[in-house]
Amino acid sequence: MILEIKDLHVSIEGKEVVNGINLKIGQGEVHVIMGHNGSGKTTLAKTILGYPKLKPTSGDILVDGQSIIGLTTDKRAKLGLFLGFQNPVEVEGVGFINFLHSAKEAVASTVNTKELMADIRTSAVNLKMVDNLIGRSLNQGFSGGEKKKAEVLQMGVLQPKIAILDEPDSGLDIDAVKVVAENINEFGKKYNMGLVIITHYSRILSYMNPQFVHVMTNGKIVAEGGKELIEKLEKEGYESFIKGN
């Protein structure tokens, strides 16, 4: 799969938040989008997945050369797109296991419940999730870090072709950052996923090997390169990129 963003513009209440983004992501690639608060990263991610309140004012989103602008979120998911939310919501009364089973059914032709449960248990152990978490309602009573681990577990269960993870390191302590990064890496390699990691900080990236780094400010990608860009940001911060744009 190739996901391509072409000259995408998105406005919220008359203010342009995404301002002419061009981006191409293929399976097996690891991309990082870094930027300060309010740079448009989350709006971009939600627009790619078809968040109902965000409609592009111009530009296009393509999967294997075909526009998906008119598709609903569930249809985009069936194509193989996945979004790990910056702030996962709590859904009382919807069991975590039932949610995973229903989500898997929505994107797969058949689901072997026994195999699915085995995969969930293995992933929960690898992510060092507390034993009783998977028996609760979806994200109900989860800490911020536990919600992030649950999102990564969902990604492993659904096995998307391209996964966008919005701040997968937020709410995580030092040890948990390493665990989450290692599991993202493992799922990415195992299922040949294209990965897009959206983050403010470089700490999770020290456990990953991104080939492509994009710096975003004021709704635009203002710099692109390899891991050397991460080092530049560590030394100079975002201010130099903001001043130049």
Image (tube, rainbow, N blue to C red):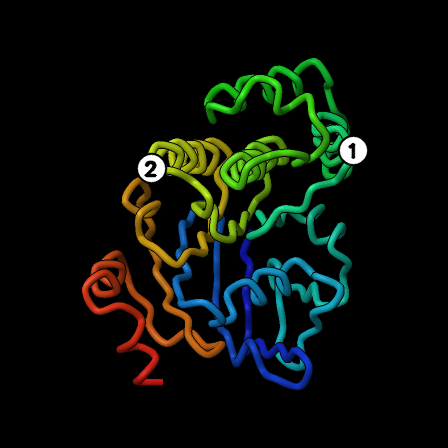
Image location of residue 11, percent across then percent down: 64, 80
Q: Give the amino acid at mark 1.
A: Val
Q: Which residue is label 2 attached to?
A: 174
> Is residue 197 positioned above or below 50 on the image?
above
Tag of residue 7? none
Image quadrant for the C terminus?
A: bottom left
Distance from label 1 to label 2 (Cα)?
A: 30 Å
> Is residue 131 positioned above or below 178 on the image?
above
Quadrant of residue 175 within the rendered picture = top left
Left or right: residue 8 versus residue 211 is: right
Q: Earlier in the sequence, mark 1 or mark 2?
A: 1
Residue sitting at the far left: 235
Quadrant of residue 229 within the rendered picture = bottom left
**Labels 1 & 2 near each other (Cβ < 8 A):** no
Quadrant of residue 134 within the rendered picture = top right
Residue at horizontal 62 percent and vertical 59 percent from the top: 63
Image location of residue 155, percent across then percent down: 57, 38
Find numbered disc 1 in the image and state the secondary structure of the residue it sits on. strand
Crowd around label 2: few <14 · some 14–19 · many ≥20 (10 Å): few
Residue at horizontal 42 percent and vertical 49 percent from the top: 29
> Is residue 170 positioned above or below 122 on the image?
below
Crowd around label 1: few <14 · some 14–19 · many ≥20 (10 Å): some
Q: Give the amino acid at mark 2.
A: Ile
Give the mark count: 2
Residue at horizontal 63 percent and vertical 73 percent from the top: 60
Q: Nearer the viewer, residue 210 or 218?
A: 218
Left or right: residue 80 versus residue 7 is: right
Image location of residue 193, percent across then percent down: 50, 42
Q: Which residue is label 1 attached to?
A: 94
